[in-house]
Amino acid sequence: MAGSERCGPGCEARRAAAWAVSESEPESEPEPLGPRAAAAAATGSRSAEGPAGRPRRRRVPGEAAARRRERERRKEQQALEKRRRREEAAAWRLLRPERCLRLMEVCADPGLLKDPGSDAWVKILSSLDCKYSFEPQAIPCSITWRRNMPNTLSSPDGPMVKTEEEKEVLVLVEPEDFLKRLFSLTQSFVNAPSASQPDLNQVLPLAGLEGSSTKTYSLAVVGLDAYRRRNQEQGRQQALSPGKQRPSSQPGPELSMTQEEILEALVVLQLWGNMEVLFLDTWQEFGQHVSALTKAIAKRPYKRQLESQELPFCAAGAWASGVRVEKDGTGLWQVWKRQIQQFNRVSPATAAAIAEAYPSPSLLLQAYQECSTEDEKRLLLSDIPVKSDISGKDRRVGPDLSRRIYLFMVSTDPDLVLDLST
């Protein structure tokens, strides 16, 4: 048949064998995927599950923004805390003794300049490393103090300097006026009942002053002894010449006060009014007192800060003569040597020699217990050799130090004096 493929019996046999072979062979495996395709397929299969097969938590709208804001807020807080610590450290540096005087301002009443000898104390005041000004005060002839602290923690629009009024007030009283006030005070508590409080306003009127209860007042009297001697001489001269006309300014009864009466009145001022009175001979001494008082007031915040710290004398570090002790006991020998070195006239070489002979206090106490007599205990350490790097000669601890260490280790008397040479 034309156009058709003719096949004989052999062709049919070959076709049947081909089909038999194809049915016996296994099906071909699928072509393996590449790394990226496999990762994409694995991600797609786990898209509905989280770690460990748990379902993935759906994110709330705006959660990422909230977390970002929280991180920014924490960063701002940390930055503010660092800034606060830097500013506190800067303020602490300003309060140190070598800088604190620059923050002080001495405010003196212009009445202190009336006396011709006031130039002496003004000269001392100008030599201080602080500001001073003359402005009217609530109490005439008085001195107050101000502290001008940089206000570093304030806002940029706030004041750059914060002024603090100190509680000390120094009042200068003339000798004549002081004796009159003191005489009035003595008369008031002599005539008043014993249970009543004396009227201290006769010495320094403070009833009408605002904030007087929070202030600490002290009085300064310049030239009281010279004033009393001068008036006593004038009184004797007038007694020797009775026919001579006396001056119009007759001395008052306050000049008749004895030294005991003055001291008694000063005790009343100290106990009832917490008011101290300072007697000075010259304006030079007055200036020196103002200078010393200014320095003491300036150093007060620094000393208060030191006192508020917990155990500042036990701080670790070489600068504080401290020894670091590890958990395994490393450093205890150094501590024991430093303790021995705290005795008077004990060199590091002597302390090291004793610490090498008895490496701990318990071993030294055990050695004392093994001694039979009291003298043997006191002289236990006296023969320990001490090597000296300066002279090159060996010496010994000696009986005096041996006795002191023994008494220190065994005595229970807190008031016992160890060093007899002091």
Image (spheres, rainbow, N blue to C red):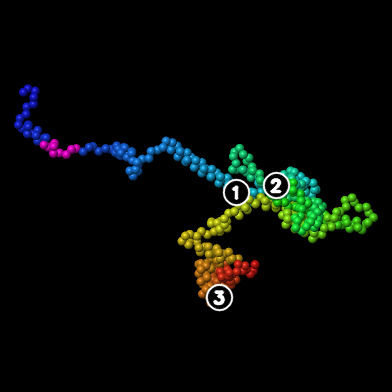
Query: In this rendering, does residue 242 appear at all?
Result: yes
Residue neighbourhood size for the residue with mark 2, other residues' Cα within 10 Å, grouped as few (<14), some (14–19), many (≥20)? few
Q: Report the residue marked by disc 2.
A: 211
Q: Nearer the viewer, residue 420 or 65?
A: 65
Numbered label attached to residue 210: none
Which secondary structure lies at badge 2?
loop
Instruction: Describe residue 118's horizontal placement relative to residue 390 as left or right.
Output: right
Q: Nearer the viewer, mark 1 or mark 2?
A: 2
Q: How many neighbours does mark 1 have within 10 angstroms: few (below 14), some (14-19), or many (20 or more)?
A: some
Q: Is residue 72 above or below residue 403?
A: above
Q: Residue at x 83, y 55 (%)?
A: 254
Say whether disc 1 or disc 3 marks the residue closer to the N-terminus.
Answer: 1
Stretch of the chain drawn in magenta: 20-28
Tag 3's secondary structure?
Answer: helix
Rendered image: mark on residue 376: 3
What residue sits 74% from the left and 43% below the top? 135
The reply to whether residue 122 is in sight is no
Label 2 sits on what residue type? Gly
Which tag, 1 or 2, sits closer to the chain's start?
Answer: 1
Residue 13 to residue 241: above or below: above
Q: Residue most toward the left?
A: 9
Give yes or no for residue 14 being in the magenta stretch. Answer: no
Instruction: Please tell me whether mark 1 sits on a helix, a strand or a loop.
Output: helix
Nearer-N-terminus badge (3/2): 2
**Label 3 amino acid?**
Glu
Q: Position of residue 406 (x, y in %)?
A: 57, 71
Q: Nearer the viewer, residue 375 or 224?
A: 224
- Residue 92 tag number: 1
* Towards the viewer: 319 or 6: 6
